[in-house]
Image (tube, rainbow, N blue to C red):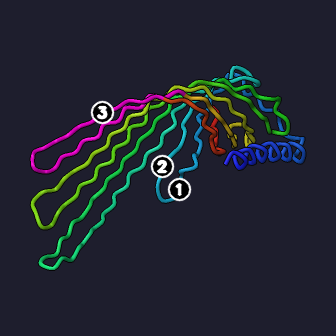
Amino acid sequence: MQKTKFSFFISILVFALSLNSFAQTNEKPINLKGKWALQFQIDRYFTLSEFQGGTISGKYHLNNSSAIRFGARINTTSDDSEGSLTMGLPDTTMSSSRNSTTSYQSIMFLAEYLHYSAISDNIAMYLGAGVNYSTNPRTVEETYIDNNTTSSPTMTDEVEWTEYGVQLLIGVEWFVRSNIGLTAEYSSRYYSAEREATSTFDDGDGSVMTETYNSSYSGFDYDYVKFGVSIYF
């Protein structure tokens, strides 16, 4: 897995160097000093049929070589599933069904500093560093219905993650026009997280049991390459 991600990283460098070598040299110089940009990046969960992830950012260029960026990264998904079980016994037939609903939302707030190389042939590479905070609630609810009785036990798992992290990134931006840039970006981060999980079992006959536990952990997270567009004004 890490080899694959490293290959993506190398691909960005090769792509940037290739564009820098073969691009036209008669373009008008681009001046970013004092400009704002609205940037949208597509995450790996984006599909044409359903939006599940993306990063929206605002960026301000202090000059041509440095910028600050603030953004929010959003992921959301929901899934419903059903199942059934039938058992034939000598005197009776037992059947039950299961309904399961899973919902997940994640929002990460980012603050980053970006350092750009000199813009050459409308292409610039950049390095960045920043901090982030995220919250990730997830709920899984399963209901079991015994068709031979009136009971319908329900199991609900609710999990809340809170994460703090620092990240490093590298990217390339190609200015297709003076106010439009296309980007490819790769990042990795170190994070520390707190996790609280609550499991609730309702037997459907008035008895409810609840269990809560907490945990903490930390580690490194290697992202996928994100492609985006920046609109300058």
User: What residue does disc 2 label?
Assistant: 52
Mark with earlier residue (2, 1): 1
Numbered disc in front, either 3 or 2: 3
Point out residue 6 in the picture as x, y percentages from the top left corner. 74, 44
Q: Quadrant of residue 82?
A: bottom left
Residue at 30 percent of width and 56 percent of height: 100
Q: Observer-nearest residue: 229 or 74?
A: 74
Point out residue 98 in the picture as x, y percentages from the top left corner. 26, 61
Which secondary structure, mark 3? strand
At label 2, counting other C-alpha atoms closer than 10 Å, the crowd grade (few under 14, some 14-19, many 20 or more) is some
User: What residue does disc 3 label?
Assistant: 212
User: What residue does disc 1 label?
Assistant: 47
Above or below 44: residue 150: below
State yes or no: discs 2 and 1 in contact (Cβ < 8 Å): yes
Disc 3 marks a residue whose amino acid type is Thr
Measure how far apart labels 1 and 3 are at the Cα level: 35 Å
Disc 2 marks a residue whose amino acid type is Gln
At label 3, counting other C-alpha atoms closer than 10 Å, the crowd grade (few under 14, some 14-19, many 20 or more) is few
Residue at 69 percent of width and 33 percent of height: 169
Residue at 30 percent of width and 65 percent of height: 83
Magenta residues?
A: 192-216
Disc 1 marks a residue whose amino acid type is Thr
Tell whether 62 sits left or right of 44. Answer: right
Residue at 15 percent of width and 67 percent of height: 147
Assign the magenta stretch its main secondary structure.
Answer: strand
At label 1, counting other C-alpha atoms closer than 10 Å, the crowd grade (few under 14, some 14-19, many 20 or more) is few
Point out residue 19 in the picture as x, y percentages from the top left corner. 83, 46
Measure how far apart labels 2 and 1 are at the Cα level: 7 Å
Tell whether 189 sits left or right of 196. Answer: right
Q: Quadrant of residue 85?
A: bottom left
Q: Observer-nearest residue: 222 or 33?
A: 222
